């Protein structure tokens, strides 16, 4: 089994090597978009940043974007995605082995997440790629730029801005598991103002979340008094999800403009309860949930002193509203069915200045005030004290600064720091330094970075009935070095990164605690890894290729943890080896055909065993998943597309005992005018 876990990784490594060697014969790779903003909080060319950043353009997002944002991220080096039973279900994303709550997610630069969840992580299952221009993935600790949660990195989802030229698009798709989705966008404007609007709706009959296509006996139960074989599965577990987004800009004068944006996304779905003590409750239709995420911002942009100082003042608000109806979820003298409600909000204001210092570079500085709130509820709510609602709030005040400097027209340096102070809590500081050296004659860029990350305790960890108000922030230190190389007149692009991250003061839960002060700072972890990627065209105008490979040695360094991972063992749900390989054929006019292979090595997961009444570690098998995507441009306005997901009908699990889709077929049309 141990050797089998590495077979997909070996294939990915060999694919990477073969791709690199073959490309040396001559070809041309697609280039990344020139400008990114996430790496240093200002617009800059990709070639000038010393950080590890990947940009996913709109054209790639559209290939999988009807189902959600999570699918778009799966083939990015250093990113792990796992879904709990199909489209719309709980979907977590890890960057470089960091926990989901240690990855900061932004929409148009505005922080989103769920203040009511245990670790504050964003559930990507709720998101829709409505009208996304690009997604920027910044790997490594970025708390010096963005504050709490940016320990593993930052994912910035950037929606499309309107232009003066009107544009309209309608896309319709249908496919397996009773899936039907539609997406419509429109944009336009004039010399003074622009707008962009988008809407997306999706329905899927889905499949039973728990046990679907799992080839082994499964026992379920409450882990205390009863267990029984998994009862017969229902025909489906349906999901409905959608999103609405808008971006607006108004130019008041040559030096003053206003930007505003909003997004509203959510889903409604049925799920399964494997911990029910009554067999019929496992797949009961009562088990369902609804989630709604809304965020918005208004940003004033002012250029002063002849353009030497660019100022931004942003006000923002983000709300997550979740409701879960589940059998046997609530307790007094006996368990009963109930609704649990969660409402979390973040709002505040931020100022950022970008000061041009001529030959001395740029100086970026700013301050932020953010308020987080969390409220929980239960219905029905017994009077026996078995449920304690959360009514919590914390305010964080922050200041940050970064100096950017270019020397000799080829050495780009940054040095920055940040201080975050939680009112009534802890104050923590972070820093980051990057360097990029460009050797233009050879197409080489050498880069390096070092920095610290931090994550403040969540409202649940501090103020729930199990909370510990005096928790310390989690901390990390990371270093990395890499090389980006272009060869053969930019026909081949290669990238390699080596990184090392150490985590301390990680917050854990005491399993034997049933009152307050159950969370404590104790755990440590270490992640060492390598990220490789390559892009090339194997035959000019006919065949292109992309490959990635990631090695993550993500180790627990403490015995004290919620699920007894042995010290030195790989962290949960992080494969040590993973990779991807795709070939893009466009040798026939107007046709693009792309087989895409995803390779994931063995992972460790955990399982609450109802037979032994204990939690135990389990191994998820390695797997290879092949998708085939096709797009045909019928005319200047009309395109037809299709894809086959999991062509080989591979059986695999991303979360233990939760199903994944078999061979699936999808097709649709897209009309623009």
Image: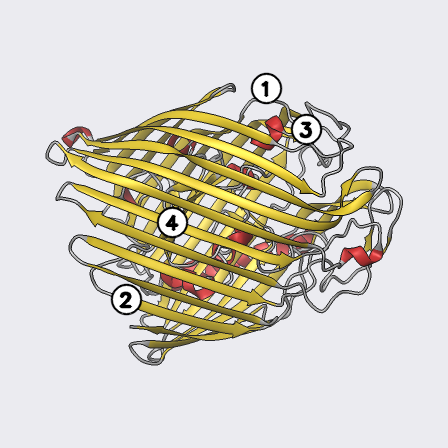
- Specify few, some or many for label 2: CA neighbours under 10 Å numbering under 14, 14-19, or 20 or more: some
- Does dot 1 land on a helix, a strand or a loop? loop
Residue 470: assigned label? 1
According to the picture, the residue beneath numbered tag 4 turns out to be: 262
**Sequence-wise, which precedes: disc 4 or disc 2?**
2
**Sequence-wise, which precedes: disc 3 or disc 2?**
2
Q: Which residue is located at x 29 percent, y 77 percent?
A: 636
According to the picture, the residue beneath numbered tag 2 turns out to be: 167
- Mark-to-mark CA distance, 3 and 2: 52 Å
Q: Which residue is located at x 23 percent, y 39 percent?
A: 301
The mark lying in front, picked from 4 and 1, is 4
The mark lying in front, picked from 1 and 3, is 3
**Would residue 120 be found to the left or right of residue 428 on screen?**
right
Residue 465: assigned label? 3
- Mark-to-mark CA distance, 4 and 2: 19 Å
Q: Note whether 93 is above or below 205 in the view shown.
A: above
**Would residue 354 be found to the left or right of residue 105 on screen?**
left
Q: Note whether 79 is above or below 146 in the view shown.
A: below
- Does dot 4 land on a helix, a strand or a loop? strand
- Specify few, some or many for label 1: CA neighbours under 10 Å numbering under 14, 14-19, or 20 or more: some
216, 220: nearer the viewer: 220
Q: Note whether 120 is above or below 636 in the view shown.
A: above
- Mark-to-mark CA distance, 1 and 2: 53 Å
- Specify few, some or many for label 4: CA neighbours under 10 Å numbering under 14, 14-19, or 20 or more: many
- Specify few, some or many for label 3: CA neighbours under 10 Å numbering under 14, 14-19, or 20 or more: some
């Amino acid at each position: 089994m141990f050797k089998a876990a590495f077979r997909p990784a070996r294939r990915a490594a060999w694919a990477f090597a073969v791709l690199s060697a073959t490309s040396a014969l001559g070809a041309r790779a697609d280039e990344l978009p020139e400008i990114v903003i996430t790496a240093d909080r200002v617009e800059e060319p990709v070639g000038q940043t010393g950080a590890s950043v990947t940009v996913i353009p709109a054209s790639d997002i559209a290939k999988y974007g009807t189902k959600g944002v999570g699918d778009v991220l799966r083939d990015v080096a250093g990113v792990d995605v796992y879904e709990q039973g199909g489209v719309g279900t709980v979907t977590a994303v890890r960057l470089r082995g960091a926990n989901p709550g240690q990855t900061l997610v932004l929409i148009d630069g505005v922080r989103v997440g769920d203040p009511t969840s245990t670790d504050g992580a964003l559930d990507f299952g709720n998101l829709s790629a409505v009208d996304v221009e690009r997604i920027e993935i910044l790997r490594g600790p970025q708390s010096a730029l963005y504050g709490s949660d940016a320990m593993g990195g930052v994912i910035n989802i950037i929606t499309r801005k309107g232009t003066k030229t009107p544009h309209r698009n309608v896309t319709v798709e249908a496919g397996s598991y009773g899936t039907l989705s539609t997406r419509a966008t429109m944009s336009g404007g004039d010399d003074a103002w622009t707008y962009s609007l988008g809407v997306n709706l999706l329905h899927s009959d889905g499949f039973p979340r728990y046990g679907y296509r799992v080839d082994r006996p499964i026992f379920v139960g409450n882990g205390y008094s009863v267990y029984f074989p998994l009862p017969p599965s229902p025909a489906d577990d349906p999901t409905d999800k959608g999103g609405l987004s808008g971006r607006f800009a108004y130019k008041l004068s040559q030096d003053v403009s206003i930007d505003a944006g909003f997004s509203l996304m959510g889903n409604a779905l049925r799920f399964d309860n494997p911990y029910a003590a009554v067999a019929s409750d496992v797949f009961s239709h009562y088990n369902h949930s609804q989630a709604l995420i809304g965020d918005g911002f208004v940003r004033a942009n002012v250029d002063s002193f002849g353009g030497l100082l660019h100022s931004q003042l942003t006000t923002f608000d983000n709300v997550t509203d979740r409701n879960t109806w589940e059998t046997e979820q609530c307790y007094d003298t006996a368990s009963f069915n109930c609704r649990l409600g969660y409402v979390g909000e973040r709002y505040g204001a931020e100022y950022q200045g970008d000061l041009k210092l001529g030959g001395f570079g740029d100086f970026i500085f700013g301050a932020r005030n953010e308020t987080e709130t969390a409220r929980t509820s239960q219905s029905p709510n017994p009077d026996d004290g078995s449920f304690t609602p959360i009514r919590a709030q914390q305010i964080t005040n922050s200041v940050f600064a970064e100096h950017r400097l270019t020397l000799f027209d080829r050495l780009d340096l940054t040095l920055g720091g940040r201080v975050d102070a939680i009112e009534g809590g802890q104050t923590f500081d972070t820093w980051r330094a990057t360097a990029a050296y460009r050797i233009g004659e050879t197409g080489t860029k050498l880069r390096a970075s070092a920095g610290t990350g931090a994550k403040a305790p969540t409202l649940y960890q501090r103020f729930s009935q199990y909370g510990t108000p005096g928790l310390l922030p989690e901390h990390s230190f990371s270093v990395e070095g890499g090389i980006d190389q272009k060869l053969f007149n930019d026909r081949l692009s290669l990238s390699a990164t080596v990184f090392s991250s150490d985590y301390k003061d990680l917050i854990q839960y005491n399993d034997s605690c049933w009152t307050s002060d159950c969370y404590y700072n104790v755990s440590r972890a270490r992640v060492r890894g390598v990220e490789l990627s390559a892009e090339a065209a194997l035959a000019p105008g006919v065949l292109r290729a992309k490959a990635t490979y990631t090695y993550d040695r993500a180790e627990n360094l403490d015995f004290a943890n919620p699920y007894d991972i042995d010290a030195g063992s790989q962290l949960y749900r992080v494969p040590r080896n993973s990779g991807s390989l795709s070939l893009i054929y466009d040798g026939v006019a107007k046709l693009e055909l792309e087989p895409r292979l995803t390779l994931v090595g063995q992972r460790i997961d955990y399982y609450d065993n109802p037979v032994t009444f204990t939690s135990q570690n389990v191994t998820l098998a390695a797997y290879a998943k092949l998708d085939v995507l096709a797009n045909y441009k019928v005319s200047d306005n009309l395109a037809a597309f299709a894809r086959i997901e999991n062509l080989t009908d591979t059986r695999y699990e991303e979360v233990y005992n939760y199903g994944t889709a078999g061979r699936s077929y999808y097709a649709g049309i897209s009309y623009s005018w």
